[in-house]
Amino acid sequence: MPQDFLLKLVQQRLDSFCDEKRRQLREISEDLDPIIDYTQSLLAGGKRFRALFCFWSWAGYLPEDLTEDQLGIDSPIVGVSAALEMFHASALVHDDLLDQSDTRRSQPAIHKRFETLHSGKGYAGSATRFGIAGSVLTGDLMLAWSSELFGEALRDVDPVSEANCRTQFSQMRFEVMAGQYLDVLEENAAPTRARSEGVAIANRVMLYKTAKYSLEAPLLIGAALAGAEDSTLRSLSNFGIPLGLAFQLRDDVLGVFGDPEVTGKPAGDDLREGKRTVLVALTLETLPASVAKIFDELLTSDEIDDDQLEFLRQTIADSGALAKTERLIAEHSQRSIEALADLEISDQGRKMLSYLADKVINRSH
């Protein structure tokens, strides 16, 4: 089954849902148009990894291989996949605001769009504060809408599968919010901690903020929708968690060394935002105290110029942290591939999950 067909259905479900929300918002006021405009714009892009991993996990536990004529826009799996994409988009809106990241997918972040709206309309008050308020509220609405999409998708699902899906969805939301707070905390608290603690803390943030929600949770939700048993879900975690760790470590490398034309974000954005990634923690634990102090001060400064950014990059590479991170990516990827080989899943499901895993491991953006 072509991937484009699946993605088309998910996009159609998101578009139809947003069209209905636009109608409801307009019944209140046309001034609410920017909320749905910016939402639909954000939902029009992305790699759709969460939807695809959820979909092929579900398909892998069906009695027979899936064909296109078995699916439609109202299929439960399409609605669940759309809900995951809506939830991911809401997390991006809040994440960009917390990180003060100005771009997303080569376009202005949502808070920057609200700032531009404020300035363009000549509104009174602070454009920055308006941008913050607008993005918080839009992200909150998208979070609520993800639950609405999820509930609608499960309307005709058997009670046991519905309960299992809801349990996994709730756990995902809980864990990613906890991980997000730990990420924000570490950006501020890291200089007060022993450098020897940095890697362990960064790994914990990575696990809960990204690995579990990006790949493990979609796999578990898809399998739960197909009626998979608890033992199957545990086996899927053995596949999804290491792959999710590899996914985030690759993201960390791209956030420092990636090409902005490919990643859609400014060069070295993670360093400018003071991100305490595993890559950074591995660097700091190897540096002499004097150099580590300079490195830390730059990470916590409000602005980093191009020369300072290049110093940070070079320090990371020279410390061996980049090479260590690449080895970790390879190790996590191998664990994931081995776990996938052990899954009791259909040949179609294994083939497509293997294809997606390769895309995650070898991605450039």
Image (cartoon, helix red, strand yellow):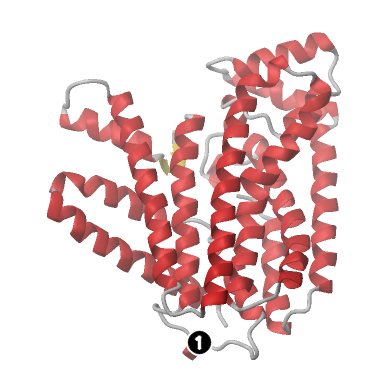
Secondary structure under badge 1? helix
Residue 204 quadrant:
top right
Is residue 54 toward the left or the right of residue 128 in the image? right
Expressed as whole percent of the image width and height from the top left, the position of residue 9 reads 43, 74
Q: Image height check: is 177 above or below 276?
A: below
Instruction: Give the residue drawn at x 38%, y 52%.
Output: 144
Q: Nearer the viewer, residue 240 or 264?
A: 240
Expressed as whole percent of the image width and height from the top left, the position of residue 72 reads 42, 82
Q: Nearer the viewer, residue 85 or 108?
A: 85
Residue at the top extreme of this rendering: 290
Q: Image height check: is 228 above or below 334?
A: below
Q: Image height check: is 227 above or below 270?
A: below
Q: Does residue 313 appear in this view?
A: yes
Expressed as whole percent of the image width and height from the top left, the position of residue 228 reads 67, 76
Is residue 320 toward the left or the right of residue 138 in the image? right
Q: Quadrant of the N terminus?
A: bottom right
Expressed as whole percent of the image width and height from the top left, the position of residue 232 reads 74, 72
Q: Residues within 10 Å of mark 1 (few under 14, many from 20)?
A: few
Marker count (numbered) = 1
Instruction: Give the residue drawn at x 65%, y 26%.
Output: 186
Q: Badge 1 is on which residue? A: 68
Instruction: Give the residue drawn at x 63%, y 47%.
Output: 210
Q: Does residue 307 appear in this view?
A: no
Q: Image height check: is 146 above or below 4?
A: above
Question: What's the amino acid at mark 1?
Answer: Glu
